[in-house]
Amino acid sequence: MASWDLAVTVEDLGSDAPAVTLSVASDLHVGGVILKLVEKTQIKRDWSDHAIWWEQKQQWLLRTAWTLEKYGIHADARLLFMPQHKPLKLGLPNGKTLRLKACFSRPVFQTVMGICKILDIRHPEELSLLRPIEEKKKKKDKDSAEEIYDLTEVPLSSASRPLLYDGMPAHFADSPEMEAVYKMLSVTQPPPAPEVIAKQYRPASVVDKAHINGRWLDSSRCLMQQGIQENDRVWLRFKYFSFYDMDPKYDVVRLTQLYEQARWAILLEDIDCTEEEMMLFGALQYHISKVSQSEPQMVSSNAAMDDLDSALQSLEVKLEGESSSASDMLVGHIGLDNMRNMISYFRPKRLTLKGYKQYWFKFQDTSISYFKSKEESIGEPIQQINLKGCEVAPDVNVTAQKFLIRLLIPAPEGMNEVYLRCENEEQYAQWMAGCRLASKGKTLADSSFQNEIQSIRSFLAMQKKSSHGNAPTNDESINTHSLVSPRYHKKYKAKQLTPRILDAYQNVAQLSLTDAVMRFLQIWQALPDFGLSYVVVRFKGSRKDEVLGIAPNRLIRIDLAVGDVVKTWRYNNMKQWNVNWDIRQMAIEFEGNINIAFGCVTADCKIVHEFIGGYIFMSTRSRAKSDTLNEELFHKLTGGHEAL
Amino acid sequence: MQSHMFLVVFYGLTFERFSTHTHSMMLPRVNETDKMDDIDTMFSHLLGEMDTLSQSLMPAADSPEVDAGSQGNCPISIGFSDLNESLNEMEDQDLDALVADLESTSDGHDPGDQGAGSLAAASATLGPAWEPKAAATLPPPSNSVESSEEMVEPQTKADRIHLALEKLKEAKVRKLIVKLLMSDGSSKTLMVDERQTVREVLDKLFEKTHCDCGIDWSLCETNSELQIERGFEDHEHLVELLSAWTRFSENKIYFLSRPQRYLMFTEPQLFYMWKKKTACLSGIKEEAKQLLIKEHFGGSTVIVPDLEGKLYLKEDGKKLWKPHYFMLRASGLYYVPKGKTRAISDLVCFVRFEKVNIYTTKNYKHKYKAPSDFCFVLKHPCIQRESLYVRFLCCDDKHTLSLWVNSIRIAKYGTVLFENYQTAVKKASGSQPLHFAADRYNSAAPNPAPPKTTNVEDYPHEPPPDFIPPPPPSQNTHV
């Protein structure tokens, strides 16, 4: 067979170097070409990750056994010999940027699997990559020197699963820098400054929200084919809101990043929530940031810790039968002694004119009793009030030295409203903590009493700082505007937000870090609009744009004129769907002869097709098969032309 | 009869019985073996605990009148002072039944006790109850207690101390004697201790009544003054629920079958597809129902039905009902107090569910001039009379009422409700061989679902769908 010249550019020789010319025959297979090429460069190195990219066809020549003829390569082909794994800048859900080597030659689905393996995120099928939103470039952008965490040195040994060392993958233990990267991945970020939140893009309508979904990369094609170059920036995000088998023990990074994505979705009003819900989210964020500072890591317990845990547990069981009840009682006494104070008392309805009166108050179990004076406290109280089931609300203004506890005490006739006025912060913190525990039916002997006092103190401290105007904020204090979306920045001053968040905080203050993160995610998932990804579509026969919402279990149709859901179709009623790639239209058939067809406006129909197929795929996952990812089925459900 | 429920609190009295006994048992033992340090420590703990116990008992035993009268929130004292009266008032057969009940329930942890010992224990419990004041100072009728105690004969000293501590704990347990009305007009009297859940009481009643043990059986409280009722949830503790009642309460408890009790699980489509016409929901397949349950209750988060719509709200203190737009969310019930937009920023939290229960009503068209009789009430369980803190809402029809009431229960109780249902289903199917009882739910009930783990679906997974689109569609596949 006649031989001819084939020019191949070798990336490693530098961009100025001329292409290497090889004399080849058409029956030479790609592997042979690579062999000749490597020999000719005379560079000794590991070439195993390298492959040939065919520029005109936008295609990798990965089948090394195929001949040039079979690929249809002639002398005019522009070929590029380069590594398949190249550095990529990855924007994480927590807003940080990571540089790592990602696969540019395999379908994005596999690229994400590789990234997730390096980052230690299970169930990579739930995540994907998308093109970032262009940031508004200001003339003097000083932030351009943002910190980039580097993971490009991590070896590409994707064959063996990284060993666990202290609960983290072994490659993170190599150096202090690597440990810092793991910390960034696995520990929640402190609340962002209010200005940072305000600066970010916020969707103002459901149509705005739809635009982001046009940015998802195609899972069936590789990065190179989608115009992503070395060192380009892409975002890694959870795409399918169907989180399988979430286990805090194995999912430290996954959970942290999911929390970050959820937190930003709330802060940027990507998902609607009510004011009450926003305050609760704020309280949880505050708590999570506080606890993660004291607990340096969301330590996933390893085997040794498990042993210790169970040992402690059995010790507890042992003690339980013997002496725990007695020691509880002792603690109870200590608590009781501290909780006798002169406190002003006010019942608004009966004594409106008289105002506050001072009494001697005593806390006992879940009740408070009061007496005329300390001397009379041995006898009958004027009244004893059981606080179990009552509502406790703060009414505090530190600058005005106002420390009120508002109690709403249920009684057969209705609720009794009672105010207790404390003298100072310390007294307030103790009595507030006592009232809160009592309202939950716990006594002062409960182990959470001291924690409760502590959290009230720290909240008071926060109010103190925020009331000092423009004092420079140090790391210790958190501006409450950092915890809520910008809508509330306008509505409330930071000082006004504090008591509202504090109110919500009392119900979550006792949660561990993991539990608080889980609670945040649960409340997020319980929001009515959770899990909806929007796309603007044009239904067949309709003349106006409408919005299609894609959820884990259903599709919804939103009429933009009505602004509301007009139709819901569930996947389990779906018989089949088809994509007409020529006119970019999707047609879906449901049981009962219901047919819908639409063209996609804000996203390619491949994206919509992939969303639906992806959710069908997510629902087929089961525990028995959770170890291996059925990649083939995913591509079958989401692929198109180039399906495997 | 003035009261249909007797609240008898054996609080201090049972304690007295055990503590006195423990004293007599413990003291000599400890003297014999003073080298055993741990026993010493335990003993001092024990003494310490008894001190505190008797301290904590003082207010309850001393002046129940004062508290109950003025504040009404000291449940311990309810019905305490007129114990004699209430026991005297009991009809003979009730008393008989109660004694029989006590025989079977006392000392459940000592199976060896069942013979003479149990009778003795029962009478010991009742003994001091008849003369509370005396029992507080005098030693209890020790002979009977002693005899029952000797039958157990613990093996080691440590065991004995352990047992003594157990008994002390037991002594702190509140117990009530409760009269339950049956749907046929008869009644049953039961002793219930504070650790018992409604589920356990129901199981007990299943044994006593030989009913079909179906999932609909429930305990239901009625309040005649407000004309409201509520089915207790199976996980709730009966004694705690009843301590919210006032003295001389007219409230009653019924044991009856409430067919809509677990409607959200037997007919989930009514709630999760409520916007669809009922006609197209009726033909829904069993698998589709199971899928709905899995989607909304199977994950780590319970998804509350996205219920919204017009409800009438009774204006504070007036017999005036105004329509408002209401919306149910997991975090509470919201409404739009004024204006017509339903934007998220217009929603105001009407009530959160942590501290209120939901009740259905009777005859509110007449009582409060409501637009319809399909009303529901949200209130703190302690509130027993009309007040500004009782929220009255009214729906257009029966179906809407059922949607709201049951959806609010989902929002309030979440996963617990689903667990209750699963237990009830298990109970109902477990009793199948014993009772022919054509359990009409067995067809509708799911295959006894395995105990639910938190966030992994344990359900038999669906096979991959067979409606995969044909992959290479360069030809026109458009329909």
Image (cartoon, rainbow, N blue to C red):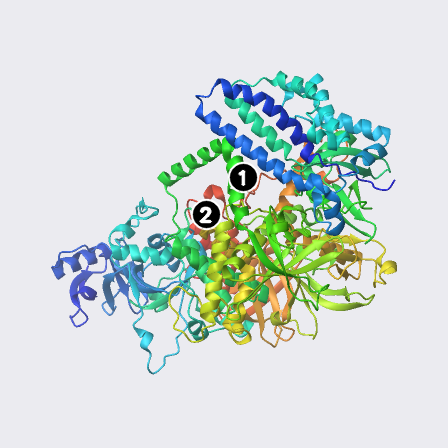
Position of residue B244 measured from the top left corner of the image (x, y, whole percent): 72, 47
Q: Residue furthest front?
A: A375
Distance from the alpha carbon under mark 2 to that under mark 1: 37 Å
Residue at x 60% of width, y 22% of height: B24
Question: Which quadrant: the N terminus of chain B?
Answer: top right
Tell us which disc is closer to us: 2 or 1. Answer: 1
Rendered-image quadrant of the C terminus of chain B? bottom right
Residue A170 can be seen in this image: yes
Counting from the top left corner in percent of width and height, residue B100 is at: 77, 25
Q: Residue B117 sits in which quadrant?
A: top right
Amino acid type indicated by mark 1: Met
Give the camera-side residue of A249 and A474.
A474
- Does residue A128 lie above or below B32 as drawn? below
In this view, the residue in front, B398 or B53, is B53
- The chain letter for the residue carrying disc 2 is A
Q: Residue at x 35, y 39 (%)?
A: A304
Q: Is residue B221 left or right of residue A409?
A: right
Q: SS class of the residue under badge 1?
A: helix
Quickly name the residue at label 1: A329
Relative to B66, is A587 on the left or the right?
A: left
Q: Dot 2 corresponds to which residue?
A: A247
Specify the farthest residue to the left.
A42
Percent across and percent down for residue B106 are 69, 26
Numbered tag placed on residue A239 in the rendering: none
x then y, percent, for residue A320: 51, 34
Instruction: Give the answer, above or below, for where B180 lies relative to A491.
Output: above
